[in-house]
C-alpha cells in the first residue's frame, strides 16, 4: 500500500497547513473546502511563516503551491483519484457524519480515510464510513512545519498495513510519526495539553485572573514560550469552543458550557484567534512576545 495522490478535506487552520506541507513534499494534492477563495487565501498566507521559519525562497514556496492541483467545493471531484483522504473538518460529529456518508459513496475502494480530529477517536468515526479497516486518525500539531509530529492511531479494526502506510507517508512529508498502541482520547499531546488549557479557561471563567496574568504566571514559573491563552489563540477559538461544547455534551458539566459561551461571545466580535488578528491577544505582535511582558 502506497499513498501518491492526497486529498485534504477542510482548509481551516490545520487543513491548510497539512495541504501545503504535503504539496511542498512533492505529493499532488487536492483540497476540498466549501469556500474555494478562503482555502486559496489560507494556503497562500502560509508563505510568510515558511519563509521566516524554513527560509524558503519565493520560487521554493511556489513549487509547493504548484503541487496543489485542485481546490474544489465538489467532493466527487476531490476524492476521485485519492489514495489517502485526510479529513480536517470542524469538531462536530454531525458534520463529520454527513461528510463521511457522502465521501464513502464517492471514494475509490483503494482510498484510505484519515481524520485529524482532536476530539473523536477512530472507533467513533469509522462506523460513519464504509471502510473501518481502512480508517485511522492522523493528528497534526498546529504549525506543522515547525512542530512536526503526527500522532497515528487506529481502531481494533484498522488493518496493520494501513498504519504502516500512514507511518511511511508521515516521514515522507517530513513529520515524526508517533504510533499509539491503542485508542486514547486526546492522543498523547492533548492528553497532556488539554488539562493545562482547561485549567486556564476555568480560572478565567471564574474571574480568578485575566488571561494575560494567567499566561504570565505560567511562562515565568515554567519557562514556557507562551501560556494557555497564547496556545488557544494558535488553535483558534472556534475549535476550542467546540471542544468545550463536546465535553459538556459528554459530561453535562455546566462549567464547560459557560466557558464555550464566553468564547462564543468573543467569536461574535471577530476575536477568533491568531488567524483573525484578534483573540485573547492582538496579532501579529501579541503582548506575550514583548520582551517586557515577563518583567512586570
Image (spheres, rainbow, N blue to C red):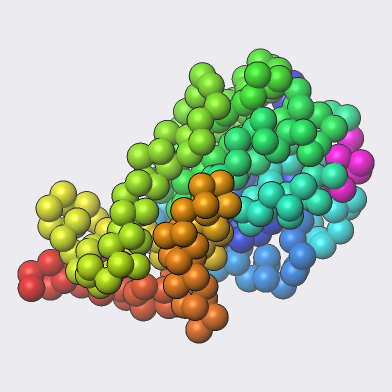
10 on left or right of 219 = right
In the image, what residue occupies the spot 22% across and 64% down? Answer: 214
Q: Nearer the viewer, residue 46 or 54?
A: 46
Is residue 106 inside the magenta stretch?
yes
Q: Quadrant of the N terminus?
A: top right
Q: Where does the image place residue 64, in percent across and percent down from the top left?
A: 62, 53
Left or right position of 215 against 90? left
Considering only vertical position in the picture, is 117 above or below 221?
above
In the foreground, 274 or 63: 274
Quarter of the image for residue 245 reads bottom right
Residue 144 at what x, y percent from top left?
A: 48, 48
Q: Residue furthest bottom?
A: 269
Assign the magenta stretch its main secondary structure: helix
Residue 7 is one of the magenta-drawn residues: no
Which residue shows up at 47% across the image and 77% down it? 266
Highlighted magenta segment, given as a residue range? 102-108
Q: Residue at x 34, y 67 (%)?
A: 205
The quarter in which the C terminus is drawn is bottom left
Residue 184 x %, y %: 51, 30
Q: Nearer the viewer, residue 57 or 107?
A: 107
Residue beneath the point at 36% across and 73% down: 280
Residue 222, above or below 235: above
In this view of the protein, can residue 206 be seen by the observer?
A: yes
Residue ranking furthest to the left: 295
Q: Compared with residue 110, is residue 215 higher up or lower down, i.e. above or below?
A: below
Amino acid at each position: 500500500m502506497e499513498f501518491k495522490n492526497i486529498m485534504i478535506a477542510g482548509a481551516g487552520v490545520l487543513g491548510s497547513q497539512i495541504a501545503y506541507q504535503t504539496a511542498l513534499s512533492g505529493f499532488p494534492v487536492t483540497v476540498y473546502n466549501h469556500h474555494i477563495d478562503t482555502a486559496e487565501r489560507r494556503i497562500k498566507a502560509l508563505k510568510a511563516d515558511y519563509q521566516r521559519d524554513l527560509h524558503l525562497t519565493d520560487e521554493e514556496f511556489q513549487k509547493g503551491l504548484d503541487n496543489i492541483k485542485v481546490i474544489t467545493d465538489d467532493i466527487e471531484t476531490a476524492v476521485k483519484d485519492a489514495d489517502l483522504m485526510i479529513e480536517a473538518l470542524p469538531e462536530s460529529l454531525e458534520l463529520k457524519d454527513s461528510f463521511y456518508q457522502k465521501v464513502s459513496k464517492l471514494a475509490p475502494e483503494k482510498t484510505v480515510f484519515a481524520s485529524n480530529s482532536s476530539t473523536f477517536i477512530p472507533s467513533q468515526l469509522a462506523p460513519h464510513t464504509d471502510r473501518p479497516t481502512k480508517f485511522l486518525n492522523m493528528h497534526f500539531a498546529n504549525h506543522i512545519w515547525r512542530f512536526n509530529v503526527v500522532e497515528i492511531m487506529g481502531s481494533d479494526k484498522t488493518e496493520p498495513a494501513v498504519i504502516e502506510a500512514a507511518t511511511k507517508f508521515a516521514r515522507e512529508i517530513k513529520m515524526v510519526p508517533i504510533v499509539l498502541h491503542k485508542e486514547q482520547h486526546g492522543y498523547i499531546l492533548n492528553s497532556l495539553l488539554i488539562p493545562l488549557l482547561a485549567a486556564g479557561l476555568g480560572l478565567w471563567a471564574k474571574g480568578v485572573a485575566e488571561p494575560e496574568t494567567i499566561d504570565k504566571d505560567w511562562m515565568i514559573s515554567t519557562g514556557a514560550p507562551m501560556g494557555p491563552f497564547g496556545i488557544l489563540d494558535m488553535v483558534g477559538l472556534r475549535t476550542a469552543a467546540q471542544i468545550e461544547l463536546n465535553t459538556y455534551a459528554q459530561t453535562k458539566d455546566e462549567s464547560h458550557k459557560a466557558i464555550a459561551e464566553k468564547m462564543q461571545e468573543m467569536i461574535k466580535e471577530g476575536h477568533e484567534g491568531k488567524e483573525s488578528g484578534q483573540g485573547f491577544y492582538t496579532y501579529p505582535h501579541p503582548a506575550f512576545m514583548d520582551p517586557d511582558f515577563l518583567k512586570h
